[in-house]
Amino acid sequence: MAVDGWGCETPGDHEADCRDNRVDVFRSQTSVEPGRWMCFLERFRSESTVGIVPIVERHGEETMLRVYSGQSKGATSFFRNRPLLRLLLTQLAGYPRHRIKVLFHASSIGAEPYSFAAYCQMYGLTASREIEIFATDIDGGFLDFAREARYPAAVLSTMNGSERDQFENDGASVRPVEALRKMVTLLPPMSFVDATFAEPFDVVCLTNAMTYVSAAEQTRTLALVASYDRGYLVASAFHPDTIEADLRRGGYVPVEDEIEAIHDAWNGRRRDEPVTEDSPQYSWVLPRFSRIDGYAFRYGAVFRKATLPSPWPNT
């Protein structure tokens, strides 16, 4: 089994160490074989009252947060794929609907919805549109943490100056500024596999969530998502052999702008060696980008409804 960011060889070792709160701070600079990440790890004693202690991992240009709550575990980061964020904002800048509703499924402790809110502010989308962001997760503890929105200060280490300006910093922890916190509404806990909504969204973000479900569950999930999404879908780490059929049934087509840059920005998922279909990492690992048959579906991450009218209703 591949050594993970903690240098542990089994999930059990990793989980046991992550749950051990007796050590306030743990730092390790790990030199690993060529092709693997250089990892810097820090145990953060959170000021949070919800009892979740994020584990901070430095993976090159990315700072990852690993979290555990009961039987749930998550991995997330701020500004996880900047080319993807910029592309989504570019698409929405030309979207004539004034009120734009965005839903984040499997949002863990909130880094991704707050990142999107920050980019909306940084790139001026909030000046011309009313942006409403909703986020949920299957774990209520993660959502409580996101509601409090207090993160280890180490997350700033891989941000640029404009990104850091979107946070309040007391030295030990950081919070998204109040304007960003007000943009995000935390919904009750739910599973993205069977969630339904009466009102539609303009963007639905599944990001890497479908790597945790079967191909059949992916098919069912995307059929449901298509029923309450009228605009864009953000998804990656899906089952690649069935994704094109699943998306086409839902009426989606790929947005190919910046597709290679987005593909290459998924830190930690790219491998030079192919992964076989029977591997548990088959939906997670990305090979080198190439324009093979169906590449826009297999390697894409932003999709849009093919039937969107032009111009769209301005409501």
Image (tube, rainbow, N blue to C red):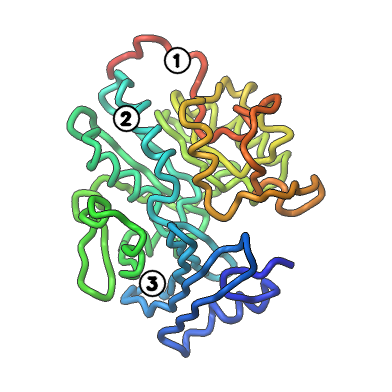
Mark 2 or mark 1, which is nearer the start of the sequence?
Answer: 2
Residue that carries the numbered disc 3 in the rendered image: 50
Separation (CA) of disc 2 from disc 3:
31 Å
Q: Say if 91 sits above or below 39 in the image.
A: above
Most foreground residue, 184 or 9: 9
Secondary structure beneath dot 3 equals loop
Count neighbours of disc 1 (C-alpha within 10 A) and say few if under 14, some if 14 to 19, many if 20 or more: some
User: Mark 2 or mark 3, which is nearer to you?
Assistant: 2
* Residue found at x 20% / y 62%: 168
Q: Quadrant of residue 312?
A: top left
Q: Residue at x 51, y 69 (%)?
A: 39
Q: Which residue is mark 2?
A: 100
Q: Which sits in the foreground, 262 or 221?
A: 262
**On screen, residue 131 above or below 59:** above
Q: Position of residue 40 (x, y in %)?
A: 47, 72
Name the kind of residue labelled 1 in the image: Leu
Tell which tag, 1 or 3, sits nearer the viewer.
1
Where is residue 249, by image quadrant? top right
Identify the residue position indicated by label 1 in the image.
308
Tell me which amino acid carries mark 3: Val
